[in-house]
Image (cartoon, rainbow, N blue to C red):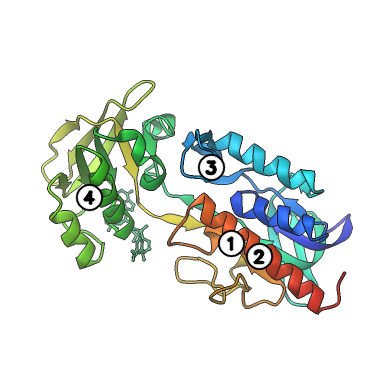
Amino acid sequence: MSETKEHVKCLIIGSGPAGYTAAIYAARADLKPVMIQGLQPGGQLTITTDVENYPGYPEGVQGPKMMEDFKAQAERFGTDIRWGYVTSVDFTGPVHKIVIDEKTEITADSVIIATGASAKWLGLESENRLNGFGVSACAVCDGFFFKGQDVAIVGAGDTAAEEATYLAKLCKKVYMIVRRDEMRASKAMQHRVENTANIEILYNHETKEVMGDKTVTGVKVVNNKSGEEKVLDVTGFFVAIGHQPNTDIFKSWIDMDETGYLKTTPGSTKTNIPGVFASGDAQDHIYRQAVTAAGTGCMAAIDAERYLSDKGIH
Ligand code: NDP
């Protein structure tokens, strides 16, 4: 299958905040890292607009610009950044095999997984068109922009419940669109939502359309029992129907939870495979922030450096 045989000390899979931070640390530790960028170079931040909660940018920064800065910093120390998508891995032996675009095989002494996660979307054309212009999948990232305004959030799990209460502190009114007659969220979270005065829960409702041309001007919903439609007068639309970690290719190798988040030894980025480290949203379903992803990317590079050093690989 492979035309090219290449061996590297440290291979980084993924190019979000975790991957680039791992690259900066690994390159400075002289691990000569090679990064395979993946399908969405720069990761989830390339589909957001303003980032105001990443330390070091007092005036805020556009998500895509921030990822260009991360990339430039990783390149400055010599990271070899390549286009490509990892299509399979083989972690049988001490030397790990990684196949890129189904044809190029690279072997690596250490692997840092930073493949991230993808937010799930409803799949509406209007939701996609207004993504970043009033439509968001992260209340903690974007809620601030809707201070004092009315917003809607779709979803009924713990994330939606948590984000609805977060938004309720900032916004005038929050509509929570729930497709069934009950929520999936834990009872404690349900009670918190029900007891928040400015949250209105719309049970048995589904979203038909996000309205607006350049920004969100409303959301059309339908009651799936009565068929009655109405328009919610909101300027923000949040989608919180779950995330999917991008970890399918690691399924038969790395221990993961039932949703697919990679398991790491607490306090480290070590997976069940020696020399394979996991960082960022691929292993974190709780915090999911750029800064926490960057933090675990740093940890992964330090863990990889110590692993290689213990093995006498210099
Ligand atoms: P979940 O998978 O738990 O919930 C997703 C929700 O989105 C469900 O209520 C589901 O509805 C709804 N949904 C899915 N697709 C659609 C759709 N097309 N239209 C409308 N609604 C839709 O995801 P979460 O992100 O909420 O949680 C993931 C995991 O993380 C869970 O195990 C959760 O408990 C955990 N978590 C824990 C927290 C904590 O403990 N503090 C905080 C956040 C998450 P339906 O119920 O009808 O299927």
In the image, what residue occupies the spot 36% across and 32% down?
134
Q: Quadrant of the N terminus?
A: bottom right
CA–CA distance between discs 2 and 1?
6 Å
Give the residue at the far top of this rendering. 213
The amino acid at mark 4 is Val
**Residue 290 placement (x, y as % from top left):** 52, 50
CA–CA distance between discs 1 and 3?
17 Å
- Residue at the disc numbered 1: 296
Q: Earlier in the sequence, mark 1 or mark 3?
A: 3
* Label annotation for residue 300: 2
In the picture, measured across the screen, residue 124 lies left or right of residue 67, that is: left
The reply to whether dot 3 and dot 4 touch (C-beta < 8 Å) is: no
**Residue 178 placement (x, y as % from top left):** 22, 50
- Residue at the disc numbered 4: 178
Is label 2 or label 3 in front? Answer: 2
Disc 2 secondary structure class: helix
**Residue 84 placement (x, y as % from top left):** 72, 47
CA–CA distance between discs 4 and 1?
34 Å
The reply to whether dot 4 and dot 1 touch (C-beta < 8 Å) is: no
Specify whether tag 1 is near ligand 1 (CB below 8 Å): no
Disc 4 secondary structure class: loop
The amino acid at mark 1 is Thr
Q: Quadrant of residue 168?
A: top left
The amino acid at mark 2 is Ala
CA–CA distance between discs 4 and 2?
38 Å
- Residue at the disc numbered 3: 45
Is label 4 or label 1 in front? Answer: 1
* Label annotation for residue 183: none
Figure check: 169 above or below 11:
above
Specify whether tag 4 is near ligand 1 (CB below 8 Å): yes
Residue 246 in sight in this render: no
